[in-house]
Amino acid sequence: MGDRWHVEVDRGLCIGSGMCVGTAPEDFRLDSARQSCPVTPDRDPSETVLEAAEGCPVEAITITLADSGEAVFPPEDD
């Protein structure tokens, strides 16, 4: 896990459930509109960030490799 990640939240999909904040409180916060925001969009890989993305009920969180843009989550279909 040496590649850096870029974490984004699609504000059009985010419903503000707070699941990501509950799973990874150091990595996500809810803004004044109750929408999720990554605390550090470009970051080292983290199991808790991946768990938060996997647990998002509307799949609003995407993780890509910062250098190549290759999908980490959700994985691209082959």
Image (cartoon, rainbow, N blue to C red):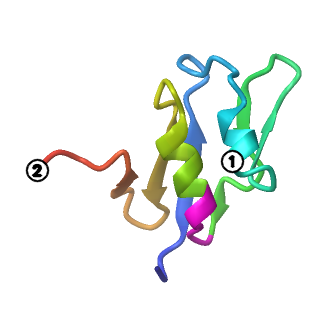
Horizontal placement of 41 versus 75: left or right? right
Q: Position of residue 15 (x, y in %)?
A: 63, 17
Q: Amino acid at mark 2?
A: Asp
- Residue sitting at the far bottom: 2
Q: Position of residue 47 (x, y in %)?
A: 56, 65
Q: Amino acid at mark 1?
A: Thr
Q: Residue under circle 2?
A: 78
Q: Position of residue 70 (x, y in %)?
A: 33, 58
Horizontal placement of 71 versus 58: left or right? left
Seen in the picture, residue 22 relative to 31 is either above or below; the reply is below
User: Which residue: 44% across, 55% down?
Assistant: 64
- The region drawn magenta spans 44-48
Seen in the picture, residue 23 relative to 58 is either above or below; the reply is below
Horizontal placement of 15 versus 40: left or right? left
SS majority, magenta: loop
Give the camera-side residue of 58 and 23. Answer: 23
Q: Are marks 2 and 1 in contact (CB under 8 Å)?
A: no
Give the number of the mark in front: 2 or 1.
1
Q: How many marks?
A: 2
Q: Toward which corner of the image does residue 38 lie, by quadrant?
A: top right
Give the camera-side residue of 19 and 16. Answer: 19
Q: Residue under circle 1?
A: 23
Element on which disc 1 rests: helix
